[in-house]
Image: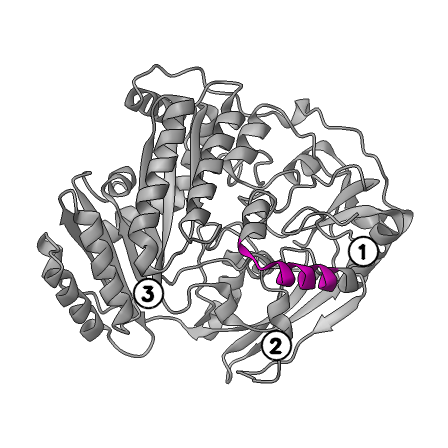
Amino acid sequence: MGRRKFWGWGEVGAGPDEQAARRIGSAIAERFGGALEELLPVPDAASLALPEPRVAAPAALASICRTDPETRAAHTYGKSWRDVIRALHGDFSPAPDCVLFPGDESELAAALDWCAGARVAAIPYGGGTSVVGGVEPAVGSDYRGAVSLDLSRLSRVLEIDRVSRAARIQAGILGPALEDALRPEGLTLRHFPQSFEFSSLGGWIATRAGGHYATLYTHIDDFVESLRVLTPSGVVETRRLPGSGAGPAPERLFLGSEGTLGVITEAWMRLQERPRFRAQASLGFSGAAGFARAAEVVRRISQAGLFPSNCRLLDANEALTSGAGDGGAALLVLGFESADHPPDARMQRALELCREGGAEGPEAAGATRSNGDAPRDPGASAWRSAFLQAPYLRDVLARASVISETFETAVTWDRFAGLHEAVSEAVRDAARRVCGRATLACRFTHVYPDGPAPYYTVLAPGRRGSELAQWAEIKSAASEAILRCGGTITHHHAVGRDHRAGYAAERPELFARALRAAKRELDPAGILNPGCLLEPAR
């Protein structure tokens, strides 16, 4: 892997070049009826202005400590639009005082001991792809300083149990390296979030990340067999079991804990055989009610027990933006896969449900693909390519001061229509009020028998220097509408700092007190990622 950008997505040199970036910026500006402002320049590592470190690591940690400006800058933010715009404006004020790279648990334990004794906040850092402020060292004045605990050296597959189809894996391993290690055994974790290339196993677990599967195995939770977690109070290691009814499962406490209760160092993960058979199709639903009709079809598919691996529904705007459609119809991208048998029968039944719901186009009659080497369905290929390129495009939009925000939720089917209408109206109103014009798109990322997970993308022209204030108004309007209509503040992007108020509004208060009590027991000094998930303890 090459050198990562310290300010935005991906590796240095990857993504659109300067000429392509100007073309993209001009196209977006034209869409909003204006002219392209000069693109914000890409930050230069040599001219970084970071605050002076407030604390210094002790000599015992000197060999794993880095304090150079580029490393500190790279560990200041995650990869949300808000993070990128602050970096483009040269604001790295929350930078950690230093970055520690423990190579084993003893070095990690020494780092936690120092932080607890010196009243220094410790921010666990996997791949740094958080889009909700989950790795930002914004810890306030109650701490003498803050360090980023980079787990990238804990990056091996330690053991594979081929019989049980499981592996013991260190938490710092990134997605591609993990799959490369499993491939010789014919196995796969098959968890592919959009951030797959640059995110870590520990990060997926700590944030309850959503992955490849649109149904059935939607979150990393489904693949966790057991965990090993290092806390300031000691080690928690859970047992490997296929299932148990013995009280609350201890590993579940750390799923979604976002580095606030302990640092995940290892996990036994359930694996699968690599798929050999696939079936793919894309289907259009035209007209003003096309998206609503397609949503009803998706409900029927999800409740039929067919369990497609891909069941992404794109509204007309989303289909147009991704290049998978012409903007005149909603698009349903379907996929089935298996390591054991052709999935043709399940695809054919899904296509029958689509035709009954008014699906249009030649794909509705649907030849399926039952060979792992077969070409992809054109609609699915276009959507997948746009999906993988989206973070690079988002960086270009930030340079053009175009607000590009995404927010996702999940809601029961009976409430979906009301939520969709209210959220769309609230976001459009806020974006038009503060930006003048806006476009809004929606897709389903995951679906369940009892409800969908809609994912919204809003684009709006920003005013240079005011982008963050405009973003905040749009974000607030979206969050308020989602909670008011019975949705969750996040389906798979985690809580972090950005969603903390929304999370507090939806969780029971008695549970919140129990969670705070667990943190006091596991992290008595309150050093682990303060302000993330929970309000900082004083």
Q: What is the secondary structure assignment of the residue under circle 1?
A: helix
Tell me whether circle 3 and circle 2 mark residues in contact (CB < 8 Å).
no
Q: Quadrant of residue 374?
A: bottom left
User: Left or right: 5 with respect to 531?
Assistant: left
In the image, residue 22 sits, relative to residue 60, either above or below, namely above
Q: What is the secondary structure assignment of the residue under circle 3?
A: loop
User: Left or right: 58 with respect to 32?
Assistant: right
User: Left or right: 402 with respect to 350?
Assistant: right
Q: Nearer the viewer, mark 2 or mark 1?
A: 2
At x 68%, y 48%, the residue is 535
At x 25%, y 43%, the residue is 319
**Segment tinted magenta in the rendering:** 506-519
Q: Nearer the viewer, residue 70 or 139?
A: 139
Q: Amino acid at mark 3?
A: Ser
Q: Return the residue at label 1.
A: 112
User: Left or right: 212 with respect to 305?
Assistant: right
Q: Which labelled disc corresponds to residue 309?
A: 3
Q: Return the residue at label 2.
A: 248
Confirm whether the magenta stretch covers residue 509: yes
Q: Nearer the viewer, mark 3 or mark 2?
A: 2
Locate residue 249, reporting x and y percent: 61, 76
In the image, residue 142 sits, relative to residue 364, either above or below, namely above
